Amino acid sequence: MDISKAGEWSRRAQISPSRCLILSDVPIDVRDETIADVLNTVKAFGHPKIHGKWGDPTGIKWFLLLETSNDIDPDTVPPEIGIPDEAGPWRVHVPEKMVTDPSVGDAVFQDKLLSLLQQEGKLLEDVKSMLEQGVKPVPAGEEEYDPWMEQAVQMISEWQCADSVKRQRIVESLRGPASDIVRFLKVSKPAATATDYLVALETAYGNTESNSDLLAKFRSTYQGESEKLSDFLYRLDKLLHHMLVKGGVVATDLNRMRMEQVVKGARNTDMVALRLRMTHTLRDPPSFLQLLREVREEEDWIRARDGGKVVVAAASVPQASLVSELSSIKQEVSALTTQMSKLLKAAATDPVPEHSSKATGPVCQVADASATEASNKKSTSKFSRPGIFCYKCDEDGHTKRECRGTENLRKVNQKLISQSRFSGNF
């Protein structure tokens, strides 16, 4: 419920308009005795009765519908009532005056506005400050200067038509003081071009930065951390337009300067900018629209690719079994290495004794077999020395240093292992 429905409340309660009053801003926790004390402070009300209570939009205040015992004069009703330091002030509304007096509508709107601000935790000063921040009213049918200038500069640089056609389009889009500026320029400079028209308008309505200031700002413009490359292009192109209008750059240099700053100012981690850095020297600088289309297509492709990634889980390998097997292999290799070292050391230091005729058993048989095999083979050494065999070719009677035969380490190892098993002192 709100105060604008006061007339409806009074008709529903069947109260005479000359005896109807409405109180607002009454706290919901106030006692009836306090309300009666406040109403008794105004003798013109007589003995008023409360016909209803409704909550206001804030939910913390009451609207009270009252009927006075006497007819009241709307002009003599006080705007607020209350008891100092005890209750109030509460606003008093006369439904009859609200209907007949147009100025009351503003008060009703103000009540609604204050109630809404109270709900949102704001003050009326906050609304005023928001309205005062750069609000530039634009007449109906007209356009703000900055958007118009951006479109005009884009048209000048992109349209492939005669300059007379461009001048005509500019003049057709102007009216009022802006049209007068172009007309004055035509009188003083009949050979003025479309770019001259824009320069004159920029002088009258644009910013006051110099060409050097705009160039420094352009060269120090970089891509933001979370900014897309396409948005970065928009910012660069706006600065270029201002420079073009100011006469700080010619139209034929726009594409080159734009591409140079994109390559310089883009983030190193931007994939689209990385491709432009790799390919920009292989072709002529594209126009703004061509470059923007390429950048947006690359951004859409990257976004679609990243959004469609399929994550494949790698198969887990039982690491415990691999570690156990590796440890076992290391132990076997270590034991074999130790055994081979002992055999080689013993063979290098101790001579093999001659076989005794009293020897019996497997040792004698192995020695006889070895002697028979050695006698059947041709010795590679000039002198055959008993008890010595080659660690290279497995032949008896010479050493590895004297050997000229083919290397056969497998037989050498087998002989060493056999001697370690069956030989006594050896």
Image: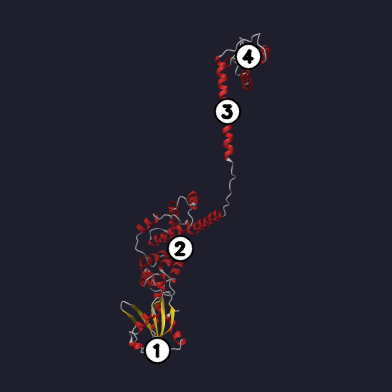
Measured Cα–Cα span from mark 3 to mark 4: 29 Å
- Count how many numbered circles sit on residues in the image: 4
Pick out the residue farthest to the front: 33
In terms of depth relative to the viewer, which is nearer, 96 or 204?
A: 96
Pick out the residue farthest to the bottom: 71
Image quarter hosting the C terminus: top right
Pick out the residue farthest to the top: 357
N-terminal label among 2 and 1: 1
**Residue depth check, mark 2 versus mark 1: number of the one nearer the observer:** 1
Which amino acid type is shown beneath numbered disc 4? Asp
Which amino acid type is shown beneath numbered disc 3? Val
Instruction: Report the residue marked by disc 2.
Output: 154
Residue plotted at (56% across, 33% down): 327
**Residue depth check, mark 4 versus mark 1: number of the one nearer the observer:** 1
Instruction: Report the residue marked by disc 3.
Output: 333
Measured Cα–Cα span from mark 2 to mark 4: 100 Å
**Dot 3 and dot 1 residues touching (CB under 8 Å):** no
* Helix, strand or loop under label 2: helix
Q: Is residue 112 visible?
A: no
Where is residue 351 drawn, in percent x and y? Answer: 58, 12
Instruction: Report the residue marked by disc 4.
Output: 396
* Helix, strand or loop under label 3: helix
When the figure is inspected, residue 325 is found, relative to residue 363, above or below; the finding is below
Which labelled disc corresponds to residue 19? 1
* Label 1 neighbour load within 10 Å: few <14, some 14-19, many 20+: many
